[in-house]
Amino acid sequence: MNTKLILTYLLNTVFFLLALYISKDITNWKSSLLFLVTAGTIGYVSEYIGINTGFPFGNYKYNNNKGVLIGGVPLNIPIIYSYFSLGIYLLTKIILNTTNTFWISLVVSLIATTKDVATDPLRSTYNDIWCWFKPDRHSSFLGVPFQNFIGWIGVFFLTTLSGIYMAGWENVMITKDNQHGVKGINLDTQRKSLLFITLLYLTGIAGILKEDKSQFRTSGVLLFLTAVLSYLVIGWSRYYENKNMLGWHI
């Protein structure tokens, strides 16, 4: 196993632990872990089904020289599904401040797919982490089938919705603090969540910028910047709005 792969495993482990730490104050460690494990499990199962049937992402397979595979799926994949689902869930809660789990899960899936559109062409078509079986150029984006993006919307909808119910977060609200047994995403958790998701996106941008394929780099950076501007800026604005409305001063 080369140094790059080891660093990738370590980085994803750190992100997983950060997601667990950041979300623990919503209720407790157990609930946060249940969300993460649920999202990771659904992510793994969807990938396993995908490489064996072509549903829901299209016909593809992971390359054997890109790390440890479990049933044909890289070890990192369920870890990424887990912390990414939780991070975007927290961002979406801050932006929308609603307990409508369907709406929350749908928006999470759309935000997650923005990231997928930005990075999948680079990882598959160029970096060859996985390969697609003869995608039709008329129904693909830079070598990635459109079915893949539709599949991501569906899978992240399920990871988020299932994670919410497994964690018991159906009625979680945006709060100042979590006194009197109220389940909520307090201001401290909001700030940590926004810093976490900002770190994830900056890491993604850095990964794209280091590549030397201009067509992938340009499209990827533009999509990531769109995500940062439309999601993170709104998220931070909502945080400061919540802080003022709740009479909280730091």
Image: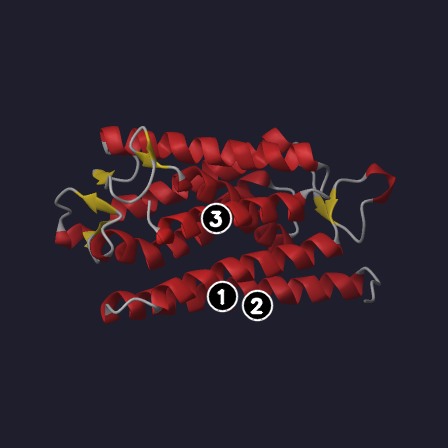
- Residue at the (25%, 51%) spot, across then down: 124
- Residue 197, how many percent across, how many down? 55, 57
Residue 34: in sight, yes or no?
A: yes
Residue in front for this viewpoint, 44 or 207: 207
At label 2, counting other C-alpha atoms closer than 10 Å, the crowd grade (few under 14, some 14-19, many 20 or more) is some
- Residue 136, how many percent across, how many down? 13, 49
Q: How many marks?
A: 3
Q: In which quarter of the image is residue 117?
A: bottom left
Q: Disc 2, disc 1: CB below 8 Å?
A: yes
Q: Disc 2, disc 3: CB below 8 Å?
A: no
Give the residue type that dot 1 points to: Val
Residue 141: in sight, yes or no?
A: no
Instruction: Give the position of the C terminus as an image quadrant.
Output: bottom right
Indicate which disc residue 233 carries.
Answer: 2
Identify residue for label 1.
228
Mark 3 or 1, closer to the camera: 3
At label 3, counting other C-alpha atoms closer than 10 Å, the crowd grade (few under 14, some 14-19, many 20 or more) is few
Relative height, residue 73 to residue 111 (above, below): above
